[in-house]
Amino acid sequence: MNNAETEKGAIPVTVNVVPGSNNSTNLPTRTSSMTNGESDYESGKGRTTFTAATVDEKALEDEEWETDPANPRNWTPSRKWSTMAIVSLYTFIPPLASSMMSPGLPEVAERFNIHSSTIVALTLTIFLLSFAIGPLFLAPLSEMYGRTWILHIGNIFNIGFNLGCAFAPSTATLIVFRFLSGFSGSAPIAVGGGSVSDLFNAQDRAKAMALYNLGPLLGPAIGPVAGGFITQSIGVKWVFIVIAITSGVGSVIAIPFLRETYAPILRFRQANRDGDAEKAARAHPALIQAQGSLLSIIWISLTRPLEMLFRSFICFILSLYMAFNYGIYYLMFSTFPALFSNTYGFGPGIGGLAYLGLGFGFVFSTLLGAKWGDALYKYLAAKNNGKAKPEMRIPFMLVGSIMAPIGLFWYGWSAQAKVHWIMPIIGTSIFSFALMTTFLPITLYLVDSFKYAASALAAAAVFRSMLGFAFPLFGKQMYDALGSGGGNSLLAGVAIVLGVPFPIWIYYRGEEMRARNPLTK
């Protein structure tokens, strides 16, 4: 029976569909239940009805899926973690590329005869502008067509665009290829968090999310270390060639072994193999609707991350705080070369080692933070009669919110006082530890709270990449005016305002706010 028809005596159930769809089946575009923590699709203002019997069939299929061996959450631990390792490898490479050229900025300026410090910084940060835009397109597409090929195709394009950077004949060409490489490189950022949600339940998600988050944070810290020695020995051109080679190795590993994790796609394929078209339609109605109204669905999907930012104060304020810290992180990349060259006399190769302080903080936080964060989350759930809530992620975040300004004060004033070079590096380690300690709970909170995990993370990624792009453009001017101590004190003050009172408020009022918002679970 057609889903749009109502049987005699059946209870009509109303759901959303995409307006203007010409699909003859009039399939619903919002499923009656959640799949792997993320509902399949939400559409526009059109409406249709289908029978309660159809809802019962869908509920039964959802229940069967919970115990199906094909469900990624039922995979063996080795298969889950090998999949997570490949996704994390993909997630590591583009952030590595984002900063790897930073020690070579003086050579870029000389090669292309650039005299503006803003244009020099733009060759580095333009990557982050497209890194912000990409998830708006790629995250919704992954929720329609699956995670795997979005990752593969993005990485393959990344190879070509980095080779374009290597052989760019002019500043404009370099900036264009950096922009394109940022867009293609955003694929893992757009879908990786969704993969974590696909594979792990909320109680087991922290370690996997820590591994996933390590790439976007550790990659930019390691990049300048390698980039400094490459630039000093064989030139900045080879920085981009090495990135292309690394991406190629990633594809060689991932294409044969990475498997799809998105439940609606897996269930859709399974139903098609069984020759059950109606079951396939119930498994992933958004994909069926796309056959009749692809542009409408893509438009709605593209606007979903922005809708989350503007309609959910929780998503907005947590994304803003994450973005502010990320902006400071990239501000350090653009100012480290001048600081450690002018103040401490470091060359490009040795100067790259200054970034290891950031990397140490990230690794230390990953090793301990996930364990501590999980333990605190489970402790609070146990005190609440075993009932876990997303707000139980917030207390661990406050540890990082307090440590971040401490690290900024330490870094800024020790650099201004020109004490031993290890002191500002220790300050950056404290800051990076705090950064990871806030990123992990925020990411988990967004995944736990919102119906569309990939789109929620895309919203946060857009925000943070925009500030990561913008901060280095004014960094030199700020430090020239205020000095390292004053500039970092200003940043620390804003970090305190954003990072302490609002999370405390969310901890006590977040559940009430989520209950009023249709975008949350």
Image (spheres, rainbow, N blue to C red):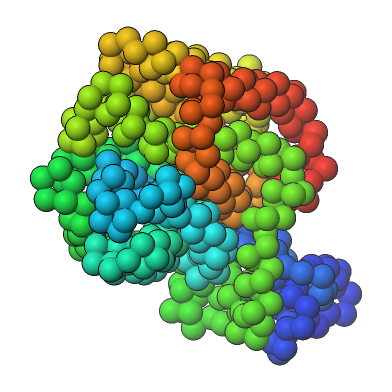
**Residue sitting at x 29%, y 63%:** 165
Q: Quadrant of residue 292?
A: bottom right
Q: x and y percent of residue 215 in the render? A: 36, 42
Q: x and y percent of residue 214 in the render? A: 37, 38
Q: Is residue 48 above or below residue 111?
A: below
Q: Residue furthest right?
A: 9
- Is 240 positioned to the left or the right of 268 in the image? left
**Residue sitting at x 16%, y 51%:** 235
Along the viewing direction, whichever of 59 and 153 lies nearer the viewer: 153
Query: What is the total number of numbered labels drawn onto the structure image?
Result: 0
Along the viewing direction, whichever of 42 and 159 lies nearer the viewer: 159
Q: x and y percent of residue 387 in the render? A: 65, 28
- Is 7 positioned to the left or the right of 405 in the image? right
Along the viewing direction, whichever of 177 and 6 lies nearer the viewer: 177
Q: Is residue 263 above or below residue 119?
A: below
Q: Quadrant of residue 61?
A: bottom right
Q: Is residue 5 above or below residue 470?
A: below
- Is 492 positioned to the left or the right of 219 in the image? right
